[in-house]
Image (cartoon, helix red, strand yellow):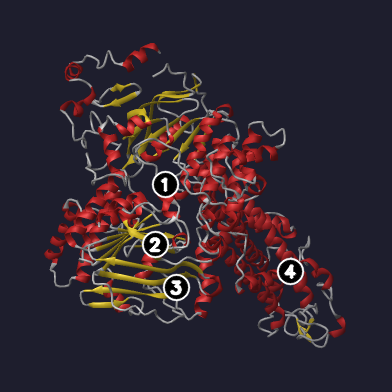
Amino acid sequence: MTIDSTTIAQAEPTFQRSHTVRLPRSPKVIGGAVIVAIFGLFAAIGRWVAPYSPDATDTKNWVQHVLVPGTGPGTEFPANYYPLPLGPSAAHWLGTTVFAQDVFSQLVTSTQATLFVGLLAAAIATGLSIFFGVTAGYIGGGTDEGLSLVANVFLAIPGLPLLIVLADYVPYAGSSVILVAVIIAVTAWAYSARVLRAQTLSLRNRDFVEAARVSGEGRLRIIVAEVLPNLIPIVAASFLYTTLYAIYAYVAISFLGLGGSPTSSPPGLWNWGEMLREGFANNAVRGGWWWWWAPPGVCVAALGTGLALLNFGLDEFINPRLRIAGFTGKAARKAGINSRTATVITPVMRKSAIPPTGAMPADAVLEIRGLTVDYGYGEDAVHAVSDCDLVLRRGKVLGLAGESGSGKTTLALAAVRLLRPPAVITAGAVRFRSPKGVVDMLDATQPQLRAVRWSEIAVVLQSSLNALNPVTSVGAQFDDLLRAHRPLLGRSGRADRAGELLKMVGINPDRLRSYPHELSGGMRQRAMIAMALALDPQVVILDEPTTALDVVTQREIIEELIGLRDRLGFAALFITHDLSLLVEIADEIAVMYAGRVMERAPAASLFHAPRLPYTHGLLHCFPPLHGRRAPMEGIPGSPPDLRDLPTGCAFHPRCRWALEQCRTQVPQLSLVDGSRREVACWLHDGGQTVPDELARRDPMLVAQ
Amino acid sequence: MTKPSAPILEGQNLVKHFWVKQGRGPFARRAPIRAVDNVSIRLDAGKVTALVGESGAGKTTVGRLLAQVVRPDAGRVLLDGKPAPAGRPRSYAAQVQMVFQDPFASLNPVHRVRHHLARPLQIHGFGTGDVDAAVADLLRRVALKPPDQFASKFPHELSGGQRQRVAIARALAVRPHVLIADEPVSMLDVSIRLGVLNLLADLRDEERLAILYVTHDIASARYLADTISVMYAGQLVESAPSERLTDSPAHPYTQLLLSAAPDPDRPAPPHLAGRGAPPSLLAPPSGCRFHPRCPYAMDICKRQAPPSVTVADGHVSACWLHVDAAQRTSSENGVPVGAGSHIDKEKQKR
């Protein structure tokens, strides 16, 4: 069989992404979990640990009497007395109420009903929201419109008034916690239903749902087994949120006397709202008996805080962006980096001394020496780029080739310090020769960098199709740029220049009035290139500028770029995964693998006589357009995971010529075949017989 | 060409329009996007047919029409010579399967590999025996070894190439006769694309699968496919055995595609014939849809859609250049073109 065997044995060293479910372990989440756990414990065992019955009056400790309002002298009723509430003591940890009942026992007993109603209501509400949200989202059409209408009506009715009306009108609502929970749930489900509907809508069109449909899976099974499991984090978050809401709602209606009181008939259950109601009804605030009304209030607030903190943790779990900010932010502060700067600037933390660099080569515009870039700090750091050297020469195109994750974009953007933290430059030197003198990019201050970027070094990004501002016209965007950088140009001068730039990239200047969405993908990319060239830069960095475009458009844009390069004389760094394209357009090519430059050579030499096994393999990954069709092999295995790189040469697990040495020692880039090309491979260290495939005659050498 | 055997899956004169709102509000006019217009294509057992074109050319829609995921507005899909039943019943799913473009999206992140492969087996009644053994067998067929280790992995634990192999294994689970692979390698890293293409080639050779390979990369189509069909703006413009199509393209659009494709062996920079972008499918050009970009456009190209002309054995091109001048004029006078051409003879036979 010609199938390359992607066996575990090969994959193991290269691909071990451990995405084991790891809940964020920030102090917030732990705090929230502890708070909720304590309340949970009290709810479970409170009945048995309470020192007194919540209803029992402690006659032994009656010390003083308080006149019941509306009785005694001056009224028609005989004087009637309450016992004076006692402050906290050894016998009553949180004192007593005006009925000589133990506050602590009431508090502990109340926890159970409060939490029970909260959880039950949240469970019912979540069930309703899943039913309405997921069904509406998945089935769509009329069902969606009907169910969404119901949800919207419930959303439009203010929650608390509805709750009060329901609790008041439903008979016996107060005496049944289940009925109370149902009433709360009815007012609480609609918001989550909308969130779940929106999520389902986006999941419904995902390929794996379509794949299940194509394989003949039934509708119910797709909803339950394919869609729902993906919603679990959101369902959990909405459950926590609804629990919080339900507890507040239960406390609120109990405080209003609608949640059932232990003294009414039929009797309700003790809960925090009821405790607050009794306290407030009996002058607890005016009497200064804080131990009576404060504890239930504090409990409501504390449980609410606990649930909110847990929800925050879930949010971090669902949204990886927050997770990264939470995790690495701390490490960044430890490392002394302010990761919250508004302008993009890559921090530099060089441990070793700056390598001696000497004079720049005469025709070099941008020189990168030993550049090393990490993502993250300290032990968690991933080395995205290690010890890379590149030289951009005036008027030349340097191609940077590599697969996804090989570090090609990181290398280029770090050199102009356009990566945000947690990216950090940990070693190396980058020098840029501007007409005004040599700038050390890694020592440059923010104003220095600002002066260089765009006007001297321009970048066309991978996603630049979306980089144009969608709400202003193309012309306005050119105008902004020119006004900021060419203050001497007048209004008409700027308009002329903008038109000239568009014409240069093959777009009719009429298009200045167009908005980005009115342009095709190819035109937007051309407009981006025109903007990059607007200030006559010395260097243009092009990061996969044509990957999203069709071949014909790609070819046209590349032709234009080469023509402009010939006319304007800038140096270009062209980054792409398409080595076959690069061979056609670049003067020199550097091949990256796992964060290192592994081979650097003139384009023709690299294509006709590769020296690196990886380059050789990569060149044989592009089927030719001519000649006899023959089976090709590709490269076995998969690109490595930067978090878990193989030892020695990172390519050795996939290399058919791997030596013992390759497993243990990292090869360094060194010159071969004279002074024009370099390769990092042990096969070329002079002590080995080089395989024929890697020893072809270099056409450039022959030409000399 | 030897007498062709009956195709396994065939689309005849398929038409699919997607209706979009023009403007805003409830009374906005609706206009059709002519995504697929009168496309006929056949898939044979043990052959790979490539469908090549730029984005928006309608090639994915043709694949989805053949898989019956979308219903055609006109034309019909024949499976083993019989019209495909409406509603895409399981019997159809058991014969025609799809592989999607993005292996990072086509596997459900919450399920293990075993689930992805066992479900189709259970749905289609192969689940009575030893499901684990059947899953292991599927994984072995797509060269994921050792299978028992892969079966218990989640998609995120696999690399892109491995995921795409799982997706292919899932499609193979129901023992289909036809596989529709929509850009199966375009999201994969360059170094592992050939592995997946070679796997498809082996399935064609060893299991006699009929494969539709939808791609924008004409070089990979040449590598894998036996026949290449080229689509432009919703229509089929050329169809030929793959080496013949790339070595001597007969349609100006195919020539343009080939001249634009990256080709390191090319001695001089290519000359692009037919610059510009594909037309809007809301208001496609009259006549031949390629005429505004065509360097050889004639008067008739603007007025009348070209017929499919057989330029050589098995090589069909929809272009007026291959209709001789006399016929072109008579066609303008209302006489059907190519009355004696091979295609029409074939049509008459059917």
Q: Which residue is more in the foreground, A388 or A346?
A: A388
B156 above or below B129? below
Q: Residue B293 in the image: x percent, y percent?
A: 21, 37
Mark 2 vs 1, N-terminal side:
2
First in sequence: mark 1 vs mark 4: 4
Q: Which mark is nearer the camera, 2 or 1? A: 1
- Residue B337 placement (x, y as % from top left): 24, 17
* Callout 3 amino acid: Val
Mark 2 crowdedness (10 Å alpha carbons): few <14, some 14-19, many ≥20: many
Residue B155, placed above or below residue A543: above
Q: Amino acid at mark 4?
A: Thr
Q: Nearer the viewer, mark 3 or mark 4?
A: 3
Find disc 1 in the rendering and name its residue: A620
Along the viewing direction, whichever of A692 and A239 lies nearer the viewer: A692
- Between discs 1 and 3, the one toward the N terminus: 3
Residue at horizontal 51%, vertical 74%? A377
Mark 2: which amino acid?
A: Thr
| Residue designated by label 3 | A424
Residue A111 numbered mark, or none: 4
List the residue tagged with mark 2. A409
**Residues at marks 3 and 2, CA–CA distance in whole angstroms:** 14 Å
Q: Are labels 2 and 1 on one chain?
A: yes
Residue placed most toward the observer, A570 or A701: A701
SS of the residue at dot 1? loop
